[in-house]
Image (cartoon, rainbow, N blue to C red):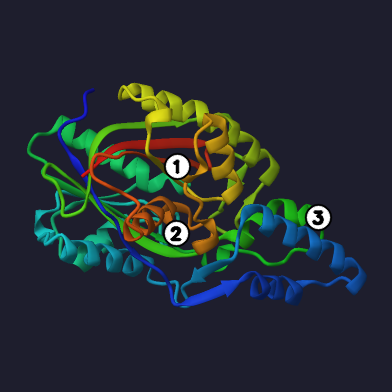
Amino acid sequence: MPVPAVWLSAPATRLPERMETNESTLAMVRAHFRGSPEEWRPLERRMRLLLTICGTEKRYFYDQTRPVAGHAAAALADLLVHESIDPRAIHTLLYTGIAKEYFEPATAAEVAARVGAPRAAAIDVGAACAGMLVGVHDLVARMALDDAIELGVACSASISGEYLSYDIQNVDDLDVRGAGLTIGNASTAWAVGRRPFRSGGRIVGCHVESWNDHQDICRTPTVGHFTVRSQEMFALQDHVPDFLRRSAARVGWDMREVDLVVSHQPSNRSMRELADAFKVPRARFPELHQLYGNTETSSVPLSLRTLIDDRRLRPGMKVMLGSAAAGFVLASVALVWE
């Protein structure tokens, strides 16, 4: 199906006020540790090595994690004000976050009510860290099918709350809970429409794939804590370069011609490895993990917002947004920046 003439807005983003450093995070783990000082020291060294490899320096957390929809609605309200969008003009509103307070109705329905869009089609999209890109894909597909749809929005509240566990007693615990030490919170929103926005890019392609035989590697259960078998998850990153090549080829691009790849930020090392895989300057794969940690569904829009504010994007640039997520889901959006 060809992509209609549609544009993606620059994202609106919100960060919590409370910042945690590596030292304060390790202090929380130490407070839960039940072993001896002799047992703590080698475990601490491993955690510090993990944070160094990832490039983690700081992350932000909401003290009040509920209502989840309230955080997403705040970011979306900022977007509507900036783009002078009447919320009643929103045809489809997607909530793409992992965090939820209830199974029904859709969290998107509460977001819609909060921002003044009582008749928007309110739908939740679940695709782990790739949620915001899958949301763009879904909105573009809806517009391709229905010429009457003029505007859709996607929003997310990346909130970890009680799902992060700092109860790490040994190396086995660290293997499945260590990635949680890099997690941070944020809220984001962006829009897809048939007219250019004040700041944004023209969408030229979207691509989503799932490798469902790896669905058990990373999980946030309805009751319990976030876990990920980190070594296996990192190994799956080897599939990302080929996915991006195919995503670029679908729109007639060569990845070596792409000016910026704005990616989900699980670690800075993953950004360097991607750049090296394509044999392009590492600056084309910006490393931003040290600024916010891994903000899961908010990572790509938060990274894009940072690059916009740093004046890294210029008209005519070819930009690839990409994410790899639990599931194992791969998603991309190709833009020409305007």
Residue carrying label 1: 284
Q: Residues within 10 Å of mark 1 (few under 14, many from 20)?
A: some
Q: Quadrant of residue 245?
A: top left
**Left or right of 227 in this view: 142:** left
Count residues near mark 2 (Cα–Cα under 10 Å), then give few for <14, some for 14-19, many for 20+. many
Determine which residue is flagged by label 2: 99
Left or right: residue 291 compared with residue 124: right
Label 3: which residue?
Answer: 171
Quadrant for the C terminus, please: top left
Asked whether disc 1 touches disc 2, contact meaning CB atoms under 8 Å apart, the reply is no
Most foreground residue, 262 or 3: 262
Considering only vertical position in the picture, is 180 above or below 201?
Answer: below
Cα–Cα span, label 3 and label 2:
28 Å
- Give the residue type that dot 1 points to: Arg
Of the image marks 1 and 2, the number of the one nearer the N terminus = 2
Q: Inspect the image, locate mark 3, and give the three-letter code of the amino acid beneath it.
A: Val
On the image, the x and y values in percent for residue 192 come to 21, 46
- 303 or 15: which is nearer to us? 303
- Disc 3 crowd rating (10 Å Cα; few below 14, some 14-19, many 20+) is some
User: At 63% from the left edge and 41% from the top edge, which residue is drawn?
Assistant: 233
User: Disc 1 vs disc 2: which is toward the camera?
Assistant: 1
Q: Which mark, by number, is residue 178?
A: none
Answer with the quarter of the image where residue 336 lies: top left
Q: Mark 2 is on which residue type? A: Ala
Point out the image quarter for the N terminus: top left
Precedes in sequence: disc 3 or disc 2: 2
| Closer-to-camera residue (48/62) | 48
SS under mark 3 = helix
Which secondary structure, mark 2? loop
Q: Is residue 234 above or below residue 10?
A: above
